[in-house]
Image (cartoon, rainbow, N blue to C red):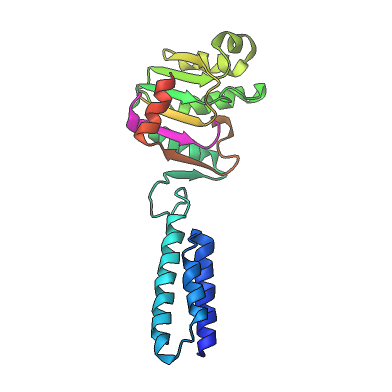
């Protein structure tokens, strides 16, 4: 490999690093390579620098990998629901196992067409553990508005049978979050509303303790 080819290769490699990291200090290294007339003995140094740079690029790639990918090394992903509503529902059911109380932040939880209310209600009742005694749904509308205008709310309330249903009105929350037993280690994020689960790809992932507590503090 000629000296110029070696330099060009290293320059390209370093420029790629610059695009990834934004580290302008490496501009000095590139300039240095082209200002000096390297002879054969310097090939080893150039190759070593190139090798180090490639390792750094690989590390940057891993650091920038989305933590919500299934094979991410961070291990933060818990579940990704594609086009199977049944799988998504089953996963939520597993996460609620043993809960005595459940809090749901979901602005569109009761936004279901009237002819789909019965099936939707059955699916929701199906995710609830036998241990649950109370459910709180946080959404923009209060209970009096829903009682008069929303058939889905009335259908769910009737089907709960002995389980207390409480609505809390809030417009502060956008994301969908479920919390079991008001415990910081039992909160999880759902990428979409329960009524849209399985329609598109969405993530269901555990929340950090402090993030779960933040939602609880809003109550």
Location of the C terminus by quadrant is top left
76 is higher (above) or lower (below) than 165: below
The correct choice, above or below, for 190 with respect to 67 in the image is above
User: Residue at (41%, 12%) from the top-left corner?
Assistant: 162
Magenta stretch? 182-193
Classify 96 as above or below 150.
Answer: below
Question: What is the x, y in percent for residue 191?
Answer: 52, 37
Foreground: 153 or 160?
A: 153
Residue 147, percent from left and from top: 58, 10
Residue 181 screen position, x and y as percent? 35, 24
Given residues 52 and 39, the one toward you in this image is: 39
Residue beneath the point at 46% across and 55% down: 65
Q: Position of residue 163 (x, y in %)?
A: 42, 15
Q: Which residue is painted at 58% across and 27% down in the image?
A: 119
* Quarter of the view holding residue 100: top left
Residue 112 on the magenta span: no
Q: Is residue 186 magenta?
A: yes
Q: Could you tell me which residue is drawn at 48 percent across and 83 percent down?
A: 36
């Amino acid at each position: 490999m000629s000296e110029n080819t070696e330099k060009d290769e290293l320059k390209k490699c370093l420029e790629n690093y610059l695009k990834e990291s934004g580290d302008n200090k490496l501009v000095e290294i590139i300039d240095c390579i082209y200002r000096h007339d390297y002879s054969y003995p310097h090939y080893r140094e150039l190759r070593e620098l190139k090798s180090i740079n490639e390792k750094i690029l690989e590390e940057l790639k891993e650091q920038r990998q989305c933590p919500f990918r299934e094979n991410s090394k961070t291990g933060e992903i818990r579940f990704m629901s594609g086009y199977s509503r049944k799988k998504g529902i089953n996963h939520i059911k597993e996460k609620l196992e043993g809960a005595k109380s459940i809090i749901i932040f979901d602005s569109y939880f009761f936004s279901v067409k009237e002819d789909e209310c019965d099936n939707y209600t059955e699916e929701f009742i199906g995710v609830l553990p036998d241990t649950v005694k109370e459910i709180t749904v946080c959404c923009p509308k209060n209970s009096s508005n829903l009682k008069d205008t929303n058939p889905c709310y009335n259908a769910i309330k009737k089907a709960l049978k002995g389980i207390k249903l409480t609505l809390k009105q809030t417009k502060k929350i956008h994301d969908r979050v479920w919390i079991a037993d008001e415990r910081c280690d039992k909160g999880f994020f759902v990428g979409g509303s329960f009524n849209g689960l399985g329609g598109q790809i969405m993530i269901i992932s555990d929340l950090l303790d402090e993030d779960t507590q933040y939602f609880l503090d809003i109550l």
